[in-house]
Image (cartoon, rainbow, N blue to C red):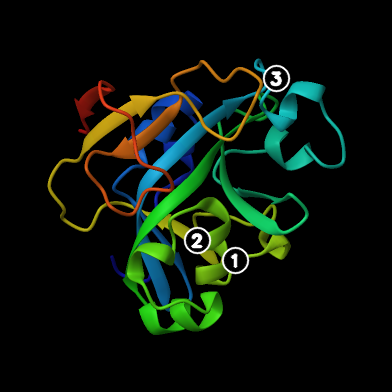
Amino acid sequence: MSAGAALGAAYYDRPVVQVARDLVGCVVRHGRAAGVIVETEAYHHSEPACHAYVGLTPRTATLFGPPGVAYMYRSYGVHAMLNAVCEPPGEGAAVLIRALEPVEGIDEMRARRGVRRLEDLCSGPGKLTQALGIGLGHNGTSLVDGPVRLGPPAGAPAVEVAVGPRIGITKAADLPWRFCALGSRWVSRPWPPGLRVRTAA
């Protein structure tokens, strides 16, 4: 992926579940560090696990804004979480980027994370933002031409995607809105057997 390549705003102006599935195999870049997305989750205002479920507030304003911007929030008071806002303004939907395969700037990632093992650098939503140097200050910034960019796959073959329920939540936990590159060793948590699989276009 070249430094200037990025998905356009129209890419995110689609149903959030579709975007979450399609982002598997795409690339996240911040500065000299980059990784291939291997795991995502979709969130929509119609279900109670989404922050937008409570409606428009100062915290959720970014979620209800235009598609193609970053929604950042702090989880458990510690971890910054990177989300891509989707669907038309007013909908309140976003894709959580859950895990990456590190591909560039690995020495910087190791320094930021304080770990050496590659599989530990970006195998979780809080880990990947720390590794790439992404923080709450990026909330509301463009993923098209801002400091954090999401770009298309760099000539990679089609990715087989496993589909299953989201993890780490108690509300609407049965929705099959978690998507993962099948067989990837970079995911945040191993997948149980028997999940549905599709081939990404």
For numbered disc 2, what is the local secondary structure?
helix
Q: Which mark is residue 128?
A: 2
Locate the C terminus and report the quarter of the image it occupies: top left
Tell me if I can see residue 87 in this picture: no
Give the camera-side residue of 5 and 128. Answer: 128
Q: Is the residue under label 1 in contact with that under label 2 (CB below 8 Å)? A: yes
> Farthest right residue?
58
Residue under the image location 50 percent in, 17 percent down:
175
In this rendering, the answer to whether 107 lies above or below 188 is below
Percent of width and height locating residue 57: 86, 34
Real-space CA distance between mark 2 and mark 1, rounded to the nearest whole angstrom: 8 Å
What is the secondary structure assignment of the residue under circle 1?
loop
> In the image, 147: left or right of 60?
left
Q: Are marks 3 and 2 in contact (CB under 8 Å)?
A: no
- Please tell me which residue is depicted at 57% across the width and 72% down the height of the picture: 133
Provide the residue designation for mark 1.
Answer: 134
Q: Is residue 189 left or right of residue 44?
A: left
Q: Position of residue 53 (x, y in %)?
A: 74, 22
Classify residue 191 as left or right of residue 141.
left
Q: Which mark is residue 73?
A: none
Disc nearer the start of the sequence (1/3): 3
Report which residue position mark 3 lands on.
Answer: 48
Q: Amino acid at mark 1?
A: Ile
